[in-house]
Image (cartoon, grey):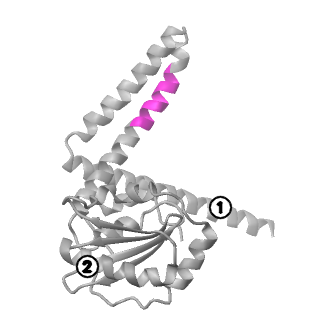
Amino acid sequence: MVKQDKAAKKAAAKQRRQALWGRVQQIFEAFRMQRREDRLLLPLMLATFVGVVLVVFLVGLVFDYQWAALPVGIAFGLLGAVLVFGRRVQANVYRKADGQPGAAGWALENLRGKWRLSQAVAGTSQLDAVHRVIGRPGIVLVGEGSPHRVRSLLQQEKKRVSRLVGDTPIYEFAVGTEEGQVPLRKLQSRLMKLPRNISSAEVDSLENRLSAIASRNTSMPKGPAPQGAKTRSVQRSMRKR
């Protein structure tokens, strides 16, 4: 029995090491990919690291604790460099995904918090689509594609949904670069800034009611797979269902 427990612990430890090594390899692969395409990546990371270390060291110097502050500055400098890396990678991924069919649905999959996503609840043969998200703000309809066709799709879907949700707030967004549209890279932040109008229990109730609506079959893909999409593991953000 003891031998079995030791063997199980060793196997679990080996799996953890393999998982950690896999994540490290993914990060380095993302770094190599980004560096090939982004000449400013390394200079910005180095500048951030040196700047943060210098600021912390000077603050420590004022209080005569400069050498004690140095390790703290190095730690914060590394953190700042990693944050710069993550932001540059994220911007690159969104830049490549922008304009591709399914890009909005792909971005919505990575929303943080308790969001319930139904992709392509309405669409056209031209790959226009409306995605429905249920969360604490209420119902959010996100359209992507040709502006005039998406506008019509959003209106139709809003009428259909409003029959079932009563006074629950319904928000509409169209993804794009034209006036009145939301850029793909800002879509998540726009949704996260919406007011919290309903409770978590009401979110569950709304999902059950709306699940009765038959989704229209479209040829819309679930989301793009732009070059560099592997960097999602670096961002470590996922949709909680």
Q: Which is more foreground, mark 2 or mark 1?
A: 2
Asked whether 50 or 12 is in front, the reply is 50
Is 29 situated left or right of 197 in this image?
A: left
Q: Is residue 145 above or below residue 181?
A: below
Q: Is residue 172 above or below residue 60?
A: below
Q: Residue at x 28, y 59 (%)?
A: 182
Range covered by the magenta-colored residues: 70-80
Q: Amino acid at mark 2?
A: Ser
Q: Image quarter for residue 105?
A: bottom left
111 vs 231, nearest the viewer: 111
The location of residue 35, given as percent across then percent down, is 24, 46
Q: CA distance from mark 2 to mark 1?
A: 59 Å
Identify the residue position indicated by label 1 in the image. Answer: 10
Residue 89 visible at all: yes
- Estimate how packed mark 2 is, as few (under 14), some (14 to 19) or many (20 or more) residues with alpha carbons within 10 Å: few
x and y percent of residue 213 in the render? 45, 89
| Residue appearing at x 38%, y 56% in the figure | 190
In this view, the residue in front, 128 or 62, is: 128
> Could you tell which of marks 2 and 1 lies nearer the N-terminus?
1
Q: Please state which amino acid type lies under the numbered disc 1.
A: Lys
Residue 111, percent across and down? 44, 62
Residue visible at 20% across and 66% down in the picture: 99
Q: Is residue 85 magenta?
A: no
- Residue 152 is tagged as 2
The answer to whether 179 is drawn above or below residue 63 in the figure is: below
Image quarter of residue 81? top left
The foreground one among 24 and 125 is: 125
